[in-house]
Image (spheres, rainbow, N blue to C red):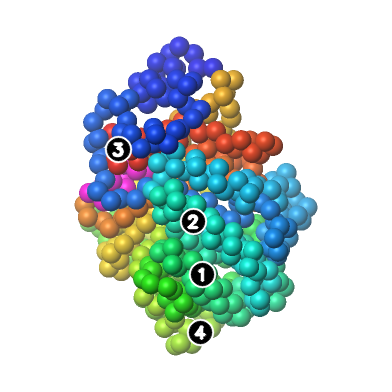
Amino acid sequence: MLNRFSRRTFARLFGSAALAPTVLPALSAEAATTPSTTGTAPIAHAFPKGFLWGSATASYQVEGAVNVDGRGPSIWDTFSHLPGKTNNGDTGDVANDHYHLYKQDIALMKSLGLQTYRFSVAWPRIFPTGTGTPNPKGIDFYSRLVDELLAANIQPYCTLFHWDLPQALEDKGGWQSRETSEAFANYAGYISQHLSDRVKHFMTLNEMKSFVDIGYRDGRHAPGLKLSPDKVNQVRHHAVLAHGLGVQAIRAHAKGNVKVGLAENAEACAPVIETSEHIAAARTAMREENAGYLTPIMEGKYTEHYLAHHGPNAPKFTDADMKAIGSPIDFVGLNNYTTTWVRADSGPRGYAVVPAPSSYPHMMSPWLRVGPQGLYWGPKLIAETWGVKEIYITENGASSTDTLTPDGHVYDSDRVMYLRNYLTQLHRGVSEGVPVKGYFCWSFMDNYEWADGYAYRFGLHYVDFQTQKRTPKLSAHFYKEVISRNGLA
């Protein structure tokens, strides 16, 4: 229980209703659609009319039901069952059981006031072996999910690959093989054909930088490989090629107009001091620090420095590859948690990345260094560098070791602090004309956090993984207020 001083402090910061037992446990649909009157602070950071507020999850992290209705195994099914690969041996076998509880979860989304929801399709649910005959029960699940979202007046945003590669494809070489890029395009076209009558925003791949570097270079994520530099660079190339071929396939099979993009954790380069020379350095760094992924997608070519730096280890590619990779996209999705600080430098690149000292503030995940300025500079430099007219923050959130208090609440003031600071920086950019059209908080609920298992929680909703009960955290109530007001104090 909070002591009396803490309760007064919370009431002052979040409104007296934030601590009322009759309010926190349930966010009613009526409350979600009624403007809040609990706060007294003016809306100092108002977002434009039509700005979309959403949240996100990923298939393997929440669905469970790994052996249900014809789903084939993914590389994460295999990897998570290998001894010592994940925290406590945790797997996504059950996770949040979202496959069976999706209607309950969508009702929670509606009560929160979400206007949009980003989900991913599990490739092995659709093609159990990666290619061949599609599984009708797989596409039926996502069709029902989309219908339920639309019935709740929530716009579906669909990600086609969020790391759960069919194991059968990995057995044939996985992302080391060009055939996987082609198989992805076939899969992307199939999903577009069956969902594009209702889903109008598609993202090809999620965080190529993460699944390639951590899974194929560092070995800490599935499939757990530590490849040589030349092979890692070829995997990178096959990932961006899959994106380009996927863009083409989605457009070729779409029913009606759709928008196509990606969700990448691009390095959000920011000047360590906001002076002209450091800003210029950050602008240069934006291209070069993302030279393996976002830059070739936006420009249809690898930078000269990237190819020269890797020399004989550089990827092998054709002109046709680069034309496909550079296929025009409608929007850029930016997954942002941290900031890459950059300073001007007299060296040949003209910039240097400033390393983070050991004392740098971070959330519970050691990698999640707090740097809200990335949510200003990242979108700003993406827009300026490549002339992008539509950007979404497709992930942003904070990890913690949330626990229920004896009165049944989760007072995650650390996450509220994090979100407030990041959204303030996002507003700074939007108010200057940076074309960010929407924000997806990661994540809608606690889930399976890859190799970290269930140790760290990112959700707006607390999940008891034994009972599958969902409990809105203090951050959910904060976010509800942001959505209701379309801004924050």
For the N terminus, the image quarter is top right
Between discs 2 and 4, the one toward the N terminus = 2
Q: Quadrant of residue 81?
A: bottom right
Residue 194's disc is: 1
Whole-Å distance between the Cαs marked 1 and 2? 12 Å
For the C terminus, the image quarter is top left
Whole-Å distance between the Cαs marked 4 and 3? 49 Å
**Residue 461 versus residue 204 in the image, above or below:** above
Whole-Å distance between the Cαs marked 4 and 1? 32 Å
Q: What residue did someone put label 4 on?
A: 317
Q: What element carries label 4?
A: loop
Q: Nearer the viewer, mark 4 or mark 1?
A: 1
Q: Is the magenta stretch mostly helix, strand or loop?
A: helix
Q: In which quarter of the image is residue 17?
A: top left
Between discs 2 and 3, the one toward the N terminus = 2
Amino acid, disc 3? Arg
Amino acid, disc 1? His
Q: What residue did someone put label 3 on?
A: 485
Which stretch is magenta?
A: 421-431
Give left or right: position of 294 versus 426: right
Q: What residue did someone put label 2 on?
A: 147
- The spot of residue 269 in percent (x, y) is 37, 57
Of 300 and 192, the residue lying toward us: 192
Between discs 4 and 3, the one toward the N terminus = 4
Whole-Å distance between the Cαs marked 2 and 4? 41 Å
Amino acid, disc 2? Asp
